[in-house]
Image (cartoon, coloured by chain):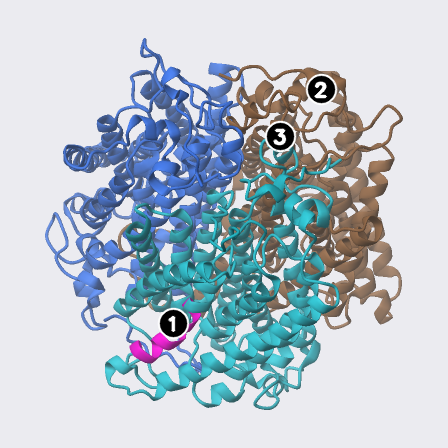
Chain colours: A blue, B cyan, C brown
Amino acid sequence: MVMVLALPAVAFAQDEPTIADLSLAVDTVWVLIAAVLVIFMQAGFAMLEVGFSRMKNVGSVVAKILVNLAIAALLFWAVGFAFAFGDGNALIGTQGFFLNATPDNVNDVFAGLAWTQVPLSAKYLFQVAFCGVSLAIVWGTMLERTKFAVYVIFAVVFAGLIYPMVGHWIWGGGWLGSLEMQDFAGSTVVHLSGAMAALAGTLILGPRIGKYDDEGNPQTIPGHNMPLAVLGVLILWVGWFGFNPGSTMAAIPDIADIALTTNLAAAAGVIGAMVMSYVRRGNVDVGMGGNGAIAALVAITAGCAFVAPWASIVIGFIAGIIMYATLEFVDKIGVDDPLGAIAAHGMGGIWGTLSLGLFTTPDLAVIGQPGLLYGGGFTQLGVQIVGVIAAGGFVFITSLAVFAILKATIGLRVKPEQELNGLDISEHGVYGYAGQIIATDDRQNGNGQYAAGPQEKVRAEDVS
Amino acid sequence: MVMVLALPAVAFAQDEPTIADLSLAVDTVWVLIAAVLVIFMQAGFAMLEVGFSRMKNVGSVVAKILVNLAIAALLFWAVGFAFAFGDGNALIGTQGFFLNATPDNVNDVFAGLAWTQVPLSAKYLFQVAFCGVSLAIVWGTMLERTKFAVYVIFAVVFAGLIYPMVGHWIWGGGWLGSLEMQDFAGSTVVHLSGAMAALAGTLILGPRIGKYDDEGNPQTIPGHNMPLAVLGVLILWVGWFGFNPGSTMAAIPDIADIALTTNLAAAAGVIGAMVMSYVRRGNVDVGMGGNGAIAALVAITAGCAFVAPWASIVIGFIAGIIMYATLEFVDKIGVDDPLGAIAAHGMGGIWGTLSLGLFTTPDLAVIGQPGLLYGGGFTQLGVQIVGVIAAGGFVFITSLAVFAILKATIGLRVKPEQELNGLDISEHGVYGYAGQIIATDDRQNGNGQYAAGPQEKVRAEDVS
Amino acid sequence: MVMVLALPAVAFAQDEPTIADLSLAVDTVWVLIAAVLVIFMQAGFAMLEVGFSRMKNVGSVVAKILVNLAIAALLFWAVGFAFAFGDGNALIGTQGFFLNATPDNVNDVFAGLAWTQVPLSAKYLFQVAFCGVSLAIVWGTMLERTKFAVYVIFAVVFAGLIYPMVGHWIWGGGWLGSLEMQDFAGSTVVHLSGAMAALAGTLILGPRIGKYDDEGNPQTIPGHNMPLAVLGVLILWVGWFGFNPGSTMAAIPDIADIALTTNLAAAAGVIGAMVMSYVRRGNVDVGMGGNGAIAALVAITAGCAFVAPWASIVIGFIAGIIMYATLEFVDKIGVDDPLGAIAAHGMGGIWGTLSLGLFTTPDLAVIGQPGLLYGGGFTQLGVQIVGVIAAGGFVFITSLAVFAILKATIGLRVKPEQELNGLDISEHGVYGYAGQIIATDDRQNGNGQYAAGPQEKVRAEDVS
């Protein structure tokens, strides 16, 4: 077991610490706080998903967040962290299950993270928080119609195997890292992975009832609570100051530079998406502003430590525009993505991973090559493209397989009347908004939201 | 007064700091951040209590949070901190009122906290945050029917005297500490104390109108907002990374180990409670998942620094199960506990305090004994049992006395029509949900919630 | 460009750091975390404004928060930070646009912040967070009737020029700093500035429809969601632990002392406002408690590093009372301030700035004079008065001019029917509370809130 430092229970009377002690202390404090910020992002995703859902499904949303966070914590501890960062081969780690290491061999067992001196427990906490973020992204496309059991089972596979393998390839000693693919804080590892699983899920699941009319035209199903959605965005924005600067896993002054590029990109992403909204629709859509921030934060994640501030603005602004265009496109071709996960995390992740092949400055190109714009040539960009295709394709195909198996066995989707009445009743026995939703019941065709067709006229059961 | 370091207003131009300066700096940063995380838990309790209340009472909930936080801050500064950590006798501290100490005598005046080098102001902030948490727990059983004046008066007594005395016994140089009782971050001091006062309160107060039918069968009064309740749980979860690791009151690498056991326990608690929900009711109850996390976090609080990661999972999982069973039992015997405070903080606190007598590893048993499972014998477990009985019994009896006096004088409970119309109107003059609640008014028997009997047909007053 | 430290992408293998390295590391960690806490305050303002708005306008509130945060980040990076902290003359900085500096000249270019050793990016992040807070305060008076374009344009001017100039005068090397005016964390720079722009805005804009009856008597328009409003207050309270202690911009033990005065003041402010509420109205108003905390936090901001704990309680308590009285007065004379920004941030800011002229202790009066109560004479108090008049007057006049120009050109205010239907529909195309608001529609005169007169009977458009 890991916990080997003796911890005096009442008296922490310390001898004068050495410089090495202090260096370890400040690094540990920083990484732990960064991990806490990233774990707090679960509250951000919860509020974002709640805000973009209809009232009848909000209890299911938050139940899923809690259970997924729990599953990720346990599975990543038992096997995921070992698969990702344990010593092994080019595809997967094969050592360190249950964080099993001693102080003497910990840097051999977890060779993929030997470069940071913080305790193994801190390495795990920071990385499991990332795994939880990736898992949360998956469900952005699958809201309001998925069986709760599917959330549970896929979480086990994703947090226990799929995500860790991608992590190993790029960060843990695997083949993409050997090719010198760069992905500083996980535009591909975390965000594209989540989005590709999300894409696989919604393709197999199909759109929500009422999302497309009889001619196949997309209908707007507005989220019921923009204040909570934006609260979610702001929590994510704040959490990203753990996500990106924390990926140094050391308390070095560069963390402030990384926070700077992160913040500028997010700001530019809001503007990019809002401009698109104004141009395309003549108003300023709230949800688009939020998704613009997220897409930009996703995009700057790969290159936040490698690009200049002006470039972070360009990356973020373009991310906001790409997000908007993708959202429109996806909607039109019949892919129902309530939260915009494919647009924000998927296309944002791809754009971000490629962008560092364009914008990495010579100064900051420590392992990879300077970007194309600085005369670094196409090599790095090519590697980035390979990485996006390999990692994205791997997650998409494996997720597609898992969802197909689930569909063929337990089924992915609740019954139509359950979907119409809301998942809260069928899956959790009570509305998440007990009290409110009954009042609006018969006026709103039994589901706390606009009518989307005659089949929605099913009335909610008494919830006592 | 404490504030003795000269603080240059414009120019903080520093000489090269010494190692001692840096050690103090990093410890202070860590403890301050941990205190902030614990203070943030007030937002968690606010959202949790709001979510589990009915719409007509939510303004009262948050008003109480604000006033209680204020009272705790002021009372604990004036007297509570001195009673808890001031030098004194086995029962209570007798020095250091108003944080009165000089740099020369601070470690004599506050001998109970002399083991940490951080400034007195940091010690106070971290400890007052704990006091505020304990006080917040008290009201979990007393929602939706208590007079606002009771919140104010009991807060003065609890934050000023009851809580500090328990703190002194275990952490401040008192008799339970002398017996080598172990309670690292306060399963007993903070959580069991709050829960025993909560139990005393609800016993004197009686259940909410409509909670039991004429035959005494418990009725479900569902909380009105699960998204906010789970937001509260997630804020508490995040805040616990200040609560447990911060209790080192020093920036040592062990903080990451403590965060690890804390996180694993919480995850296991969610699973434990969800499994119970599925077994007992056939669905996955949202509120139970949240309470499972909280019960597990409470339980790991005592032993987080002393047990192995696998043991933290066992402790958390069992806490989730115990919480569920307790909640059912308490409900059945006629004790109305809207938030589950007795189950989560009370039984979670007892189980946690005892669990370290089972699971403490020999490596981490610095002052106490290794746990029973490691061959440490029954001594430590026996001491833990004594501590639970003594501390829990003391809080229960003193709280019972205070609530009884309040009942005999100003009265504990609002009038039935006030309870039916909601505390927001009678105690605060306006609905916390002005606008929403009027709309649903006549359909929902005047209180924004299910009818629970004919006596609830009272109509809400105009709120202008 | 700033980002000059080479950042190894995969391996951060560090040599043994020096004491200077560690000192820089811990300072950077502290300032970055403090900046994150202050940026998180945007979520606090969002929830506060949402809570005090009516349901029909909440989408507009949060859209404005996102766009303003984005504008502040970009404008303050491009020009604002240079105007504020760049070397220049007594009125404005003239160097350092786009954070342009090298490691060699950074302390010359940004002479106003040369006293802290943290990286330029950290200085910027902390200061831009302050700018964002000041900007958020502006809109507290202008909710529920302002055109979205006004938010955008004024944000550019305020974040790009007005706020930076005040910052330069007091903190950046300008004339008020030369007079030794003291404003530790910005009672005047941040809060009074925001409040004076808010006052200018509401004077030109006029009150909301229905706020005053035909005889000019003020009508209560209660905010729709006190739980979210108090969540906002608690987030602000927590954020203030970055705001005030972070203003040291160094990890020194004094940060805990500053956090102590900050917390005590906030607590006393809640009590002060609640006592006023009880005396004046016979009940305990939720919103007042929250505004009492904010007013007190604003007031202690100027002197948090200079006054004793007992004085912070006096300052906070008086701030709560002043806030209440101001709110009543402002309401009566026909100034519509939905959030209480003039009372909390304006009068709180003035009182706080002056209070340090009374309460600064001799020990802590490093640059300025001890307070009047310690025999320091009237000099410091006089300088503080000059500062309040100069800074407040400057912001008021320039803001008045900008708003007047906007009124004469694009117009400040939405059309009456847009105001009645809610800004969400007219400015953003969909309700922020889609689903809820339709249900309560015809019962509540089409706007999810109390009727305020026959003209409110306009029905909301279909929002599909």
Q: Position of residue A278 (x, y in %)?
A: 51, 18
Q: Amino acid at mark 3?
A: Ala
- Please tell me whether mark 2 or mark 3 is closer to you in this view: 3
Q: Residue at x 74, y 48 (%)?
A: C188
Q: Mark 1 — residue?
A: B351
Q: Which mark is residue C456?
A: 2
Helix, strand or loop under label 1: helix
Quote the CA–CA distance across marks 3 and 1.
45 Å
3 or 1: tag closer to the N-terminus? 1
Helix, strand or loop under label 2: helix
* Subunit that carries the residue with mark 2: C
Q: In this picture, which residue range is highlighted in magenta? A: B348-359
Q: Position of residue B453 (x, y in %)?
A: 56, 43
Let me know if marks 3 and 1 both belong to one chain.
yes
Q: Alpha-carbon neighbours of circle 1 within 10 Å: few (<14), some, or many (≥20)?
A: many
Number of labels in the image equals: 3
Q: Please indicate whether residue A2 sits to the left or right of residue A428 in the image.
A: left
